[in-house]
Image (cartoon, coloured by chain):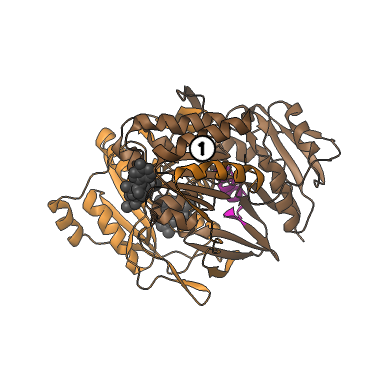
């Protein structure tokens, strides 16, 4: 049995809850993982030590981790991580890191795992139109989709050992361009409210924004919306040529459910569809489908959610 | 003058239905195209050449059937087309090892590729290749400016970051705001006549083997409602049944 190593998922300088799902995934591979927390300040790792199920927690401390650079992160983590199967989140940044880390060790990487059974790993291929199950001979780096495995829970020992590490950073951030709104990006959100061409105009996206603000969600869009309206940026696009998202809840409004849109969101845990056409393909993928115009449905949804959150 | 390589992969048309026969996908009847993000990689490579001079070589790893994707790249304007002959499915380690050898042999200042291939969805090749070459890398770029170093824009937490990237580097390209050029008649004629430069390498064995392919698990039929008033009930269920609010 290989050792397993979990690289904690760091979001905005803090350990993200997904990390505990990675611990559960490591158990599914058969062992209690060593959790490595890449950080510039070792106290960041304390949060990871609260999760149960880890064999030990190591704060890998280096200035390299102040900004993301694939080469720097891979070398600094490689220096600290023992041999074994390494697990990271399947976020865009961690997938990139996983690939570099695997290459550095001359081993393979398996991306976007959604199931682990009997040592075999299953991931979506062809944008989720099929699944692929693989077996490993030897070590590998494995990225795990968020919101698939249960959390390992809290109750960890709280012990952290600190190891200094270092790596060579090649790239440099010259400028950071913050998003105009403080709203989450679809790639980071646990709930996404998306609008399509059926919204009629970009101004009508304000109704989606109001709901998003009520429940702490991100606002997404179909490609038709992005291509039709200049005010809807590509950064909001979900799908084959947009972002692949895996939230707990995806609310699709005025979106028909074309195969390329489904490619980006079909693995969401729960899907709500609001569409005036009862035959829209999106309804085949919805847990809750509402056949109605958005003009009719959104005010009701907004006020119900608002009173629930109050 | 820059020596530019762009990686292109042939994949099933993204509109195609994917069927599983037995325990493997059956692609025999499926139309094959250039992986969508590779179109942005090709365009970026051509813009780099237009700005700095030099030559663009498109490289694919695949069987003879993959020549078509190289010809497509040629029609759009790349200078040279190279196929590394290999019919087998490779894991990331084997693929990147072969590509690293090819890039070293051809020589390059920069390699552009797609952010992920439409079949694997992996996004492993760019960063993995860079690590093997000891180069810097950036992934999911939405714009690239050319100079002694590259200046790219890529998503970062809370917005976008402009990042300077020293050469040599591997850049994996997202869609961004660039418009890809279409082949013109002259390009298509040249592509017809162009010869694919075929290379043969030892292919390392893969340490990952495919056990099976399957269709995605069917979703149980959802609940369906008529009329906007039902949104109130759905909101309740999202909290009480699904536990997601
Ligand atoms: C290579 C390639 C890549 C692509 N990549 C992507 C991608 O990344 N993401 C993506 O989304 N698409 C992508 N597409 C495009 C995709 O095929 C569809 O064209 C697109 O998803 C359609 O967007 P839509 O559902 O908003 O628009 P439409 O298909 O026009 O659907 C609009 C829907 O709104 C409904 N509607 C209209 N009025 C109302 C109302 N008042 N209230 C409620 N509902 C209403 C209609 O019934 C309809 O179902 C890609 C296509 C190709 C070829
Ligand atoms: N067999 C291949 N031949 C050439 N380029 C490839 C091949 N596989 C992947 N690539 C390149 O690497 C990118 C990412 O692929 P992947 O890592 O499989 O998601 C693709 O968009 C291509 O640019």
Q: Which residue is mark 1?
A: A301
Residue A111 on the magenta segment: yes
Give residue B54's position: percent from left, percent from top: 28, 40
Query: Label 1 CB, ligand 1: below 8 Å?
Result: no
Residue B45 on the magenta segment: no
Residue B60 left/right relative to A129: left
Please state which of residues B49 and B13 is positioned toward the viewer in this rendering: B13
**Does residue A192 show up?**
yes
Q: Residue at x 41, y 56 (%)?
A: A281
Chain for colour brown: A
**Does residue A83 show up?**
no
To which quarter of the image does residue B85 belong? bottom left
The colour assigned to chain B within the rendered structure: orange
Where, quadrant-wise, is the C terminus of chain A in this rendering?
A: top right
Please state which of residues A200 and B76 is positioned toward the viewer in this rendering: A200
Please state which of residues B162 and A249 is positioned toward the viewer in this rendering: A249
Give residue A103's position: percent from left, percent from top: 57, 50
Q: Residue at x 30, y 46 (%)?
A: B56
| Residue interval drawn in magenta | A95-114
Q: Residue at x 60, y 47 (%)?
A: A104
SS category of the residue bearing label 1: helix
């Amino acid at each position: 049995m290989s050792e397993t190593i979990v690289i904690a998922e760091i979001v905005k300088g803090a350990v993200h809850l997904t990390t505990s799902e990675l611990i559960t995934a490591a158990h599914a591979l058969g062992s209690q993982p060593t959790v490595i927390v890449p950080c510039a300040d070792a106290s960041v790792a304390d949060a990871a030590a609260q999760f149960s199920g880890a064999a030990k927690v190591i704060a890998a401390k280096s200035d390299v981790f102040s900004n993301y650079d694939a080469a720097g992160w891979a070398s600094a983590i490689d220096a600290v991580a023992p041999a074994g199967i390494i697990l990271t989140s399947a976020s865009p940044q961690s997938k990139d890191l996983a690939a570099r880390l695997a290459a550095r060790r001359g081993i393979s990487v398996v991306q976007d795992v959604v199931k682990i059974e009997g040592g075999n790993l299953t991931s979506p291929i062809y944008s989720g139109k099929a699944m692929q199950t693989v077996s490993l001979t030897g070590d590998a780096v494995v990225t795990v989709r968020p919101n698939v495995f249960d959390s390992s829970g809290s109750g960890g020992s709280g012990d952290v050992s600190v190891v200094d590490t270092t790596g060579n950073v090649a790239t440099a951030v010259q400028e950071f361009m913050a998003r105009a709104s403080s709203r989450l990006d679809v790639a980071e959100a646990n709930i996404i409210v998306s609008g399509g061409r059926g919204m009629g105009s970009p101004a009508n996206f304000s109704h989606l924004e109001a709901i998003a603000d009520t429940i702490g969600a991100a606002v997404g869009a179909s490609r038709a919306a992005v291509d039709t309206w200049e005010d809807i940026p590509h950064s909001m696009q979900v799908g084959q040529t947009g972002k692949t998202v895996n939230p707990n809840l995806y609310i699709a409004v005025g979106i028909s459910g074309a195969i390329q849109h489904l490619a980006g969101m079909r693995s969401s845990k729960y899907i709500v569809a609001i569409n005036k056409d009862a035959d829209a393909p999106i309804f085949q993928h919805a847990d809750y489908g509402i056949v109605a115009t958005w003009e009719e449905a959104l005010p009701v949804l907004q006020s119900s959610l608002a009173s629930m959150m109050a | 003058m820059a020596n530019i390589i762009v990686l292109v992969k042939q994949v099933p048309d993204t509109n195609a239905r994917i069927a599983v026969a037995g325990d493997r996908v059956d692609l025999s009847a499926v139309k094959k195209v250039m992986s969508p993000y590779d179109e942005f990689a090709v365009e970026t490579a051509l813009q780099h050449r237009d700005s700095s001079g030099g030559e663009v070589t498109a490289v694919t790893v695949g069987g003879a059937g993959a020549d078509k994707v190289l010809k497509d790249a040629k029609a759009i304007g790349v200078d040279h087309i190279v196929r590394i002959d290999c019919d087998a499915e490779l894991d990331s380690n084997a693929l990147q090892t072969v590509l690293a050898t090819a890039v070293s042999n051809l020589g390059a200042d920069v390699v552009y590729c797609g952010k992920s291939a439409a079949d694997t969805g992996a996004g492993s090749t760019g960063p993995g290749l860079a690590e093997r070459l000891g180069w810097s890398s950036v992934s999911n770029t939405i714009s690239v400016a050319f100079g002694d170093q590259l200046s790219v824009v890529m998503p970062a937490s809370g917005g976008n970051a402009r990042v300077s990237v020293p050469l040599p580097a591997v850049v994996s390209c997202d869609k961004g705001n660039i418009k890809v050029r279409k082949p013109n008649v002259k390009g298509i004629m040249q592509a017809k006549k162009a010869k694919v430069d075929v290379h043969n390498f030892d292919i390392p064995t893969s340490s990952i083997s495919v056990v099976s392919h399957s269709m995605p698990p069917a979703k149980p039929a959802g609940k369906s409602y008529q009329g906007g008033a039902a949104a109130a009930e759905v909101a309740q269920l999202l909290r009480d049944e699904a536990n997601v609010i």
